[in-house]
Image (cartoon, rainbow, N blue to C red):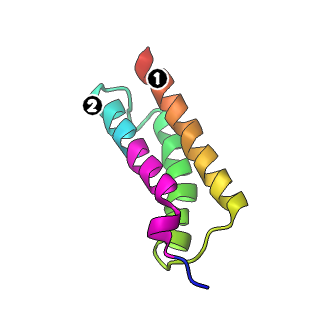
């Protein structure tokens, strides 16, 4: 059975969009510098995990198993929390 990921993974897609908005907010308030460890960590997490998820699951329309879904959701939520903490200072 083939699943349409655009329906099955709306939570992940919406969180990725929200994360993107938070990163933009960091830049807007000059709290994200390319030389900072924060920038490097966000970039690594984004490239190694989120981008790979998009390429592996979203684009080819492959079903995502629950364990992998929880892993990527938790990673995105953790990153959003870190960014929110920085923005609140």
Instruction: Give the camera-side residue of 10 and 53.
Output: 10
Q: Is residue 34 above or below residue 62?
A: above
Residue ranking furthest to the left: 28
Residue under label 2:
28
Instruction: Give the camera-side residue of 58 and 7.
Output: 7
Dot 2: element: helix
Q: Is residue 28 above or below residue 69?
A: above
Task: From the viewer's perspective, tell me whether residue 6 is left or right of residue 26.
Answer: right
Whole-percent x, y for residue 70 in the image? 66, 52
Residue at mark 1 to residue at mark 2: CA–CA distance: 13 Å
Q: What crowding class fits label 2: few (fewer than 14 Cα within 10 Å), some (14-19), or many (20 or more)?
A: few
Whole-percent x, y for residue 8 in the image? 52, 65
Q: What crowding class fits label 1: few (fewer than 14 Cα within 10 Å), some (14-19), or many (20 or more)?
A: few
Q: Which disc number belongs to residue 36? A: none
Q: Which disc number belongs to residue 86? A: 1
Whole-percent x, y for residue 32 in the image? 38, 32
Determine the residue positioned at 61% across, 45% down: 75
Question: Can you say which quadrant of the picture contains the C terminus?
Answer: top left
Q: Main secondary structure of the magenta part?
A: helix
Determine the residue positioned at 56% across, 49% down: 45
Instruction: Give the camera-side residue of 41 and 66.
Output: 66
Please report contact status of discs 1 and 2: CB closer than 8 Å, yes or no: no
Whole-percent x, y for residue 60 in the image? 49, 79
Magenta region, residue range: 4-19
Q: Is residue 17 above or below residue 1?
A: above
Is 14 in the magenta? yes
Determine the residue positioned at 50% across, 22% down: 85
Is 65 in the magenta? no
Of pointers 1 and 2, the one earlier in the residue sequence: 2
Task: From the viewer's perspective, tell me whether residue 49 is left or right of residue 70.
Answer: left
């Amino acid at each position: 059975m083939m699943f349409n990921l655009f329906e099955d993974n709306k939570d992940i897609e919406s969180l990725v969009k929200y994360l993107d908005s938070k990163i933009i907010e960091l830049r807007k308030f000059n709290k994200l510098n390319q030389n900072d460890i924060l920038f490097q960590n966000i970039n690594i997490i984004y490239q190694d995990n989120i981008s790979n998820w998009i390429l592996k699951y979203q684009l080819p329309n492959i079903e995502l198993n629950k364990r992998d879904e929880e892993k990527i959701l938790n990673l995105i939520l953790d990153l959003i929390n870190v960014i929110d903490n920085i923005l609140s200072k």
